[in-house]
Every structure is written in structure tokens, then in C-alpha cells.
Image (cartoon, coloured by chain):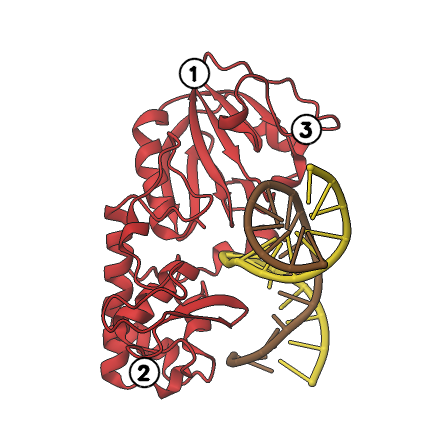
Chain colours: A red, B brown, C yellow
DNA sequence: ATGACGTCCTGCCTGC
DNA sequence: TGCAGGCAGGACGTCA
């Protein structure tokens, strides 16, 4: 699932290819994915605008447009952004009869939900599970549907995410540490993969209550979060199921995972079997021996 | 305010 | 082989 490193990889690939390009057409293949405003207004508002920058906030990918507009993508569980050549034949907008597959290009855009036609290529938003969303904001709009976006806190890789900040956010909390790592108003950009990996590196069991962490453990966890995210970015993200890069290639960080997707396999450190347990409503992997 | 959990969504996997 | 049912999980709403 796309977390901070995956979105950052997409951003880095996208930026040089789409900056200063004009959106010449917008095809909404499934209107549920338009989170704001109404799908009809959405399309009209972005056509003929130019992309001025490609940025990112936690797991949100942002295309800055002319006229002070922002196109904000959230890929949720299975979303992907694909850049495809212009030669690709595009369907006409027929949301009622749309079946998900587009002739001749089934593999590439089988689950296309939104297509932005740019001056030199097509930007395709795929989302098999249809939980992903796209939002268009004008000026200083802050619609309720984007509450989470406006409540994001610091990203663990940012300088503001230091020991004082982290300790202040978690030290008095009773919740499971795993669940606080997933909280976007505490650790913006962290998801299930990187939370499990960071806890492993810090040697902390995901079942621990946050207040029970010692100062040294909070510090270790802080460094682990930063390390695991930075290494995820360096390796173009983690492909375990749906995630892929803008040209369809896989990421590489799956080759360096210690616990995620490794249940029942031996721990790289001690050889114990990696445990899979539902914690904080998430499939959570950890080493029963190395993580205390 | 906090913590736990249900809901959304649909392709895919498992088991009969 | 076919099908039903369960699972995956990020964000958000609800409830205690």
C-alpha cells in the first residue's frame, strides 16, 4: 500500500515529466473517486490549467496548478499513478457503461478511474478497490472531506519530528504504540508496512502501550522511523501487492523487509518465526524474540 | 480528549 | 471447476 516512500517515489518521477504541462482534457471513469467538488465541476475546473509543481504531504500527492488550484490525490490501499504515451487511445466518458478495461491496453489501465490528458502524455489514476480519492482545491478552501489532510502533523523524516516532539505526542498515551504510529496526526505518512519495520528495528513489540516505552526506546523508535522511511525512498518504495512506479516498475524495498509480509519465516536476527497478529485492526508482524 | 472498533470497496485467495 | 465467503487496510465516523 502506498505510504510516504511510495508517494515520494511517484512525486520524484512525475515532476520532471509533467511540470509546465497543460491539462487538455479530463476523463472521469468512475465518479466516486472524485472527493471534492462535484464531479461535473471538477472536470471543468482543471481543464486548460497548467501544472506548476508536484509536491507531497504525507501520503497525499499534490499537483499545483495555475489559478491557485491544487489537485490532491490519495491512493489509499491500491492506487497507482501511471504515465503513458499519448498514442494510447482513450475512451470517451461513459461512466454508466464503463467496465474497467480499455481496448488494447488492458494491463496498463485496467482499473483506470481518472485520466488527465496532458500536452505530451496521459496521467492515469488507477485504483482497483476504488477507495482512493482526488480532490480539487481552489485558493484557501478547506472542505470537511479533507479534514485528515489539514490535520496532518510532522513527517518522521522532517527535522521538526525530533525527540521532544515525538515524546510529547506519545509518552502519556495509553494506546498501543502500533496504533499511534498509524495516527496521521502524530506520524504523518506512516502506514502498516513502515510501522512494523520501524518497531522491529527498535526492538519494540507492537502490543506495548505507548506510556510504557522508556526514554531510550522512544529515541530508538524515532531513529528507526527516520531510517526506515529514508531507506524506503532510496529503494523506490515497497512492492508487495499493488504498488508500482509511474512506468509500471516495482519498488525494491520489499527485498529489505524484516517482518512485513514475512509471517512464519525466520527472523533475520534470531531465527524465530515471525508472528502475525491483528493489532489495532491491522495485520501486524513482529519477531516474538527480538521485540520486547 | 482518548481509545476501540465498524464501515467503505473490490480483487484475490481459500476451502468446500 | 465453480462459487461463496473472508480478507486486506487508510481514513473517518461513532460510541463508550
The chain holding disc 1 is A
Residue at image coords 45%, 79% = A176
Q: Residues within 10 Å of mark 3 (few under 14, many from 20)?
A: few
Q: Residue A96, percent across and down?
A: 75, 28
Element carrying mark 3: loop
From the viewer's side, name the closer residue of A81 and A290.
Answer: A290
Q: Which residue is mark 3?
A: A99
The chain holding disc 2 is A
From the viewer's side, name the closer residue of A283 and A212.
Answer: A283
Give how far apart the Cα atoms at labels 3 and 2 are. Answer: 49 Å
The chain holding disc 3 is A
Q: Mark 1 or mark 2, which has the lower sequence index?
A: 1
Q: Which residue is mark 2?
A: A292
Which circle marks residue A256 in the picture?
none
- Is residue A158 visible in the rendered structure shown here? no
Q: Which residue is mark 1?
A: A119
- Contact between marks 1 and 2 (CB within 8 A): the answer is no
Residue at image coords 26%, 69% = A201
Asked if labels 3 and 1 share a chain, the reply is yes
Q: Tell me: residue A133, above or below residue A47.
A: below
Give how far apart the Cα atoms at labels 1 and 2 are. Answer: 55 Å
Q: Mark 3 or mark 1, which has the lower sequence index?
A: 3
Asked if residue A134 lies left or right of residue A235, the reply is: right
Give how far apart the Cα atoms at labels 3 and 1 are. Answer: 27 Å
Asked if labels 1 and 2 share a chain, the reply is yes
Q: Tell me: residue A120, above or below residue A38.
A: above
Q: Residue furthest top?
A: A87
Q: Residues within 10 Å of mark 1 (few under 14, many from 20)?
A: some
- Is residue A130 visible in the rendered structure shown here? yes
Element carrying mark 1: loop
Amino acid at each position: 500500500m502506498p505510504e510516504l516512500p511510495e508517494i515520494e517515489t511517484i512525486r520524484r518521477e512525475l515532476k520532471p515529466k509533467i511540470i509546465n504541462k497543460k491539462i487538455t482534457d479530463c476523463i472521469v471513469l468512475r465518479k466516486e473517486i472524485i472527493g471534492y467538488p462535484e464531479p461535473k465541476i471538477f472536470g471543468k475546473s482543471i481543464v486548460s490549467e497548467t501544472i506548476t509543481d508536484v509536491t507531497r504531504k504525507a501520503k497525499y500527492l499534490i499537483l499545483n496548478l495555475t489559478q491557485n488550484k491544487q489537485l490532491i490525490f490519495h491512493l489509499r490501499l491500491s492506487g497507482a499513478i501511471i504515465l503513458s504515451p499519448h498514442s494510447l487511445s482513450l475512451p470517451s466518458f461513459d461512466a454508466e457503461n464503463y467496465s474497467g478495461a480499455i481496448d488494447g491496453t488492458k494491463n496498463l489501465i485496467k482499473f483506470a478511474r481518472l485520466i488527465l490528458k496532458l500536452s505530451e502524455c496521459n496521467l492515469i489514476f488507477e485504483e482497483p478497490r476504488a477507495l482512493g480519492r482526488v480532490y480539487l482545491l481552489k485558493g484557501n478552501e478547506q472542505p470537511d472531506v479533507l479534514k485528515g489532510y489539514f490535520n496532518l502533523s510532522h513527517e518522521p523524516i522532517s527535522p521538526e519530528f525530533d525527540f521532544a516532539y515525538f515524546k510529547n505526542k506519545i509518552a502519556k498515551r495509553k494506546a498501543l504504540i502500533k496504533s499511534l504510529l498509524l495516527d496521521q496526526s502524530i506520524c504523518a505518512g506512516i502506514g502498516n508496512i513502515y510501522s512494523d519495520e520501524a518497531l522491529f528495528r527498535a526492538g519494540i513489540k507492537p502490543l506495548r502501550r505507548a506510556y510504557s516505552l522508556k526514554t531510550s526506546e522512544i529515541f530508538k523508535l524515532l531513529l528507526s522511523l527516520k531510517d526506515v522511511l529514508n531507506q524506503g525512498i532510496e529503494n523506490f518504495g515497497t512492492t508487495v501487492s499493488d504498488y508500482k512506479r509511474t512506468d509500471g516498475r516495482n519498488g525494491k524495498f520489499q527485498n529489505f523487509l524484516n517482518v512485513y509480509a514475512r509471517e512464519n519465516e525466520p527472523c533475520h536476527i534470531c531465527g524465530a518465526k515471525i508472528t502475525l497478529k491483528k493489532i489495532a485492526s491491522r495485520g501486524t508482524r513482529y519477531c516474538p524474540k527480538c521485540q520486547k
